[in-house]
Structure formats: structure tokens, C-alpha cells
Image: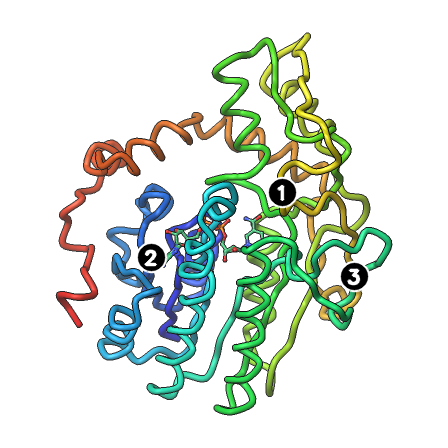
Amino acid sequence: MRILAAGGAGFIGSHLTDRLIKNGHTVICADKLVMGRRNIAHLEKNRQFQFYQADLADARETEALFKKHKFDAVYHLAANSDIQKGAAEPEIDFQDTLMTTRNLLEAMRKHGVRNLFFASTSAVYGEKPDTRLTETSGELMPVSYYGGAKLASEALISSYVSMCDMHAVIFRFPNVIGPRLTHGVIYDFIRKLRKNPKQLEILGDGTQCKPYLYVLDLVRAIVQLTEQWPDTEQVYNISPVGEGTPVTRIAQITAEEMGLSDVRFLYTGGSRGWKGDVPRFEYDISKVISTGWKPDYTSEEAVKQSVLDAINAGWQGEESKQRCRGGFYELQTAAAGISAKGNQSNSVIESG
Ligand SMILES: NC(=O)c1ccc[n+]([C@@H]2O[C@H](COP(=O)([O-])OP(=O)(O)OC[C@H]3O[C@@H](n4cnc5c(N)ncnc54)[C@H](O)[C@@H]3O)[C@@H](O)[C@H]2O)c1
């Protein structure tokens, strides 16, 4: 299959791209590189891979991609993942999380592409601490712009599935972790402990407790459930089996695995990490389990493994991200052994 991986240069998108290529597919990755291109550096010379730097919130750039390639399926993982930035500027979630969906759906409609995978989130449910969330749980009332933009995306997808006979698989991810992390609590803790190994600031009171899913378990599920596209639309909750992991426990594991002792935990206080945070939720995952998928990692094992992954990879998160955002993009790509102006990279406007 010829697949469009929207947001394929991100943390999860790059792992998914690796797996799709391994399974023999050709992947066209379109990404505006908010996080840089370090996660796809290893694919630059792969003949089953092509990269376009494109802003999918721009309808013209999105359309240009579909004019150039006949896709069999679209895997849509592009979204804003900078929670703080999205909270301060809702327009970012509106553009990167919702408009990307709108533009991809519209291009799919025009070009007769019928298969869509969409990366949704537990944030669509809003705050329901006493409910075991099933895919059919009602009264979805997101408490963040991000959750709102994802729920609006799901609604749009549903309408296009019905109007254009599309096939869609939607996964509502919990927290996803593993190698190549670009953000999130583990990323944040390692960054802070690298700066100051004596103390760690923890957002909230540390009792927030959510499931953490290892990225390779997730990717295996995505690939398995899109091997055959459903007739219409299927929505799945997905998470590890068993308990979630409290934030204080994540802090302990991170410090332990980094070989640090006597770290002082400083809590900012309150039951949630930030406005829009959902401090705890519990998923019913019987639907995805009934497909035969089974995760290899529990939530706590995933946390431990992800800290080790970051340490073993040689921590370079924040530095390279800042360089990229600060305009020193060529420095970062040169360090990764690829050229920023390399002929493997395409500008969608030029080629469209
Ligand atoms: N990581 C998690 O814990 C988690 C949880 C729930 C849902 N999700 C969803 O999974 C998907 C992947 O998340 P991730 O953790 O890999 O995030 P990520 O930030 O690493 O990847 C997202 C990618 O989308 C790209 N992007 C953003 N706006 C774009 C635009 N306008 N045009 C083109 N590309 C754009 C970014 O450059 C980035 O490479 C996202 O849709 C996210 O909302 C992730």
C-alpha cells in the first residue's frame, strides 16, 4: 500500500512509519517538523520512504500532496502536543489538531481515498473519575482545547465516513511512552533531573494516576487493526492491562533508573497538573482485547522501560528541540547525519 503518514516525523508517527515500512508498505510522511526531524533521520535513504515538509493545516499544501500521490490509506497523527502552548494559544489546537483533520478529510473526499486511521485521545471523554470508560460512554465533555479539537475531529470523521463511504479506525490513546519521546511527564522529569539532580518539581500533588502505554504495543495494535479496514468506523479505547501509574511513582522510577538517590520532590499542589489536565481515568479495553491484541508491558513496566530507553539513547531531548525551534535547524540535522537541504526532503508547495 501507498500510505500517507500525517505527523509521521513525531514520536508515535515515526514508530508507526518504521513498522509500516517493515511490513512492505511505501510511506509518504508529511509533517511540519515542530519537533525536528531527528525521529526520521534513519529513514532518509530508505526507498520505501519519502518526506514532505508540509503544514497540513493549510488546505493548499494538503491538496498538493494528494495531487502528487495516489494514497491507499491515510494515518493521521498530526496534532499539537505542546499542552502548555495550546492552553495559552487555543488557535494552535484549532489549527494543528482540528484543521489538519478537516483538510485531510476533504482531500480524501476529493481524491477518493477511503481508508483512515485517526489518533484520538482519552481527553475526548473529559473528566469522569467514577466511570469505567467504554467506547460508547456518552456525555463527552472535554476540559481542554486539545480534547475539544480531537472530539470535533472525531465528529467530522464520522460524518465523512457516512457521506463518502469511508472506512475509519479511531484509537483513543492514553499516555503513550517509549523511545524517541518528544514530550510528557517522563520527558519533563528527565530534563529537570539532568539540570538539578537534587530536587524535582512535580506538577500537582503527585497522586494523578493514568495508564501509560508502551509505544511498540500501540503500534502493533494500529497495524493489526488496519490490516483489514472495517466497513464503516470503529473506535477503540487502548491502554495497558491493569492499574495506571501515579505521578509520584513515575518520579521515583525516573530517579532510581537515573541512579539518583535522596531527590527532594517538590509538589506544586492541587489535584491536577495543569488546567485542562484529567488527573485520573480508567478505560474498559475489552473491545480491543477481543481482537486478539495483547500488550507486552504493564503501565509501570512501560514507565521503567521508557526511562531506560531515554538514558540508553543518550538524552538529547530539550537541547535539540530548542535548537530546532530557535532556527538552528541545520545544526541538528547535521548532527543526525542528514542534510537539511538534502534531496530526500521535498517541499510540498514546490512539488505540488
Ligand atoms: N503521546 C501521547 O501520549 C498521546 C496521547 C494521546 C493522543 N496522542 C496523539 O497521537 C498523535 C501523535 O502524538 P505524538 O506523541 O507522536 O506527538 P508529536 O508531537 O511527537 O507528533 C506530532 C507530529 O505532528 C506534526 N504536526 C503538528 N501540526 C502539524 C501540521 N499542522 N502539519 C503537519 N504536521 C504537523 C508535528 O510536527 C509532529 O511531528 C497526535 O495526534 C496526538 O494528539 C498522543
The picture places residue 323, in percent across and down from the top left corner, at 29, 32
**Residue tagged 1:** 275
**Residue tagged 3:** 133
Q: Nearer the viewer, mark 1 or mark 2?
A: 1
Whichever of labels 3 and 1 marks the residue nearer the N terminus, that label is 3
Cα distance in 3D space between marks 3 and 1: 21 Å
Whichever of labels 1 and 2 marks the residue nearer the N terminus, that label is 2
Q: Secondary structure at mark 3?
A: strand
| Relative height, residue 287 to residue 258 (above, below) | below
Amino acid type at mark 2: Asp
Front in this rendered view, residue 143 or 30? 143
Assess disc 1: are there few (<14), some (14-19) or many (≥20) residues with their C-alpha within 10 Å of its C-alpha: few
- CB-based contact (under 8 Å), mark 1 and mark 2: no
The picture places residue 127, in percent across and down from the top left corner, at 74, 54
- The verdict on label 2 being within 8 Å of ligand 1 is yes
Residue 65 falls in which quadrant of the image?
bottom left
**Residue tagged 2:** 31
The residue furthest right is 130
